[in-house]
Amino acid sequence: MLSGILASIDRLSLALIVGGGVMMAAGVRPLLLPILAQRDSTALAATIEGISINAWNRYNRYAFLATGTLAAIDIVRIFADRD
């Protein structure tokens, strides 16, 4: 039972880290690049860049928490397998 719960949390954390990184790099950034390339609207480009940076920062926070969760799960597995 514990092994199944830990495996589920493990997969969810890995999906958040990998899937979120792919979505940010391949989904969000390319959509914003045409707006950032426009020379006539520097205020809009600065706003979009701020939104992009904030989105990456939020993703990095969640990925860091998921990494900590993975580390905690591995520690629990180490101590659970000692029996």
Image: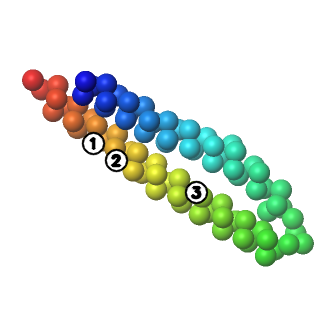
Q: Which mark is residue 68?
A: 2
- Residue 52 image offset from top left, x and y in percent: 66, 60
- Residue 20 image offset from top left, x and y in percent: 56, 44
Side of 34 relative to 67 (left or right): right
Disc 3 marks a residue whose amino acid type is Trp
Q: Which mark is residue 56?
A: 3
Determine whether the residue tagged by mark 3 lies in a helix, strand or loop.
helix
Q: Which residue is rendered at x = 78% and y = 55% of the image?
A: 33
Q: Which mark is residue 50?
A: none
Q: Residue furthest front?
A: 1
Q: Residue furthest left?
A: 83
Side of 72 relative to 41 (left or right): left
Q: Residues within 10 Å of mark 3 (few under 14, many from 20)?
A: some
Disc 2 marks a residue whose amino acid type is Gly
Disc 1 marks a residue whose amino acid type is Ala
Q: Quadrant of residue 22?
A: top right
Q: Which residue is rendered at x = 69% and y = 50% of the image?
A: 28
Determine whether the residue tagged by mark 1 lies in a helix, strand or loop.
helix
Calculate the distance from the C-alpha at mark 2 to the C-alpha at mark 3: 18 Å
Q: Residues within 10 Å of mark 1 (few under 14, many from 20)?
A: some
**Image quadrant in which the C terminus is located:** top left
